[in-house]
Amino acid sequence: MTLRRPPSPRMVLDNVSCMRNAQQILRHVNVSVHDGSAIVLTGTNGSGKTTLLRMLAGFTKPSAGQVLWNGHDITKSGVFQQYKLQLNWLSLKDAMKDRFTVLDNVQWFEVLEGKQGKSLPALELMGLGRLANEKTRMLSMGQRKRVQLARLLAMDRPIWLLDEPSVALDDEGVKLLEFIIADHRKKGGIVFVATHLPIKMEDATYLRLPPRFPRRMTFVDMLDRADIE
Ligand SMILES: Nc1ncnc2c1ncn2[C@@H]1O[C@H](COP(=O)(O)OP(=O)(O)OP(=O)(O)O)[C@@H](O)[C@H]1O
């Protein structure tokens, strides 16, 4: 009988720390990520969720430790050239051109990927088919977020880095987000999500980043005390 070795993780954050402006933001983060996994980053404002996503995207380098992809350090230039093609980044800055149509704003990214035919179905799935030929400046915030989600689908890359993806979405939008994340994972995709809001994801790994400073009394605490006294 031969014993099959378990698959190696696709990504490993190996004792990763990060400094910004001479300040320690992340300390000794360790996590192994297999295909199909979801990693949910939580923590108070300023705890470093976006910093961690930026590091995974290669915008910021770890000050110690390594991010490994297929066992290779992503900061090595030969590796990064390949790794960056795996990434899909969604943040509060939506990188959309207001004077372009909604469809153009998705298709542009799809064409850069050398792909075609996915943009309109992706917009339709997001409930925006009717608006595909409207100028993007006509959209509400939640509709813009749906366009960003359509872009994820049209670009179809394996590793999604999502910073607050549910902000501005209505209930149906959040369900669509949960659906596309589940579907992506079923196909082996990996999702990192930084969020303050609940997003349903089966068997997700939760990584709660500690607050950077001891908590001081806030206005909310004062209001709570006023209730008691
Ligand atoms: N460009 C920057 N240069 C230096 N320090 C930065 C920069 N951007 C953010 N920081 C610092 O890094 C810390 C972590 O910020 P980050 O945006 O990663 O937190 P977060 O957990 O995503 O917060 P939030 O919940 O508010 O989105 C903050 O305290 C901030 O002061």
Image (cartoon, rainbow, N blue to C red):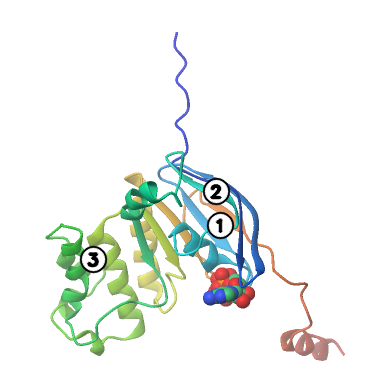
Q: Are marks 1 and 3 in contact (CB under 8 Å)?
A: no
Residue 72: image tag:
none
Mark 2 to mark 3 CA distance (whole Å): 37 Å
State left or right for residue 108 relative to residue 166: left
- Distance from Cα at disc 2 to Cα at disc 1: 7 Å
| In the depicted structure, whether residue 7 falls above or below residue 61 | above
Q: Residue at x 33, y 58 (%)?
A: 180
Label at residue 125: 3
In the rendered structure, are the residues bearing label 2 and label 1 in contact, judged by CB atoms less than 8 Å apart? yes
Mark 1 vs 3, N-terminal side: 1
> Tag 1's secondary structure?
loop
* Mark 2 vs 3, N-terminal side: 2
Which residue corresponds to the image point at 44% horizontal and 31% vertical from the top-left?
Answer: 7
- Residue under numbered circle 2: 66
Task: Indicate which quadrant contains ligand 1.
Answer: bottom right
Query: How packed is label 2: few (under 14 Cα within 10 Å), some, or many (20 or more)?
Result: many
Amino acid type, residue under disc 2 in the picture = Gln
Q: In which quadrant of the rendered image does the N terminus lie?
A: top left
Residue at coordinates 41% horizontally, 43% vertically from top-left? 35
* In the depicted structure, whether residue 120 falls above or below residue 15: below
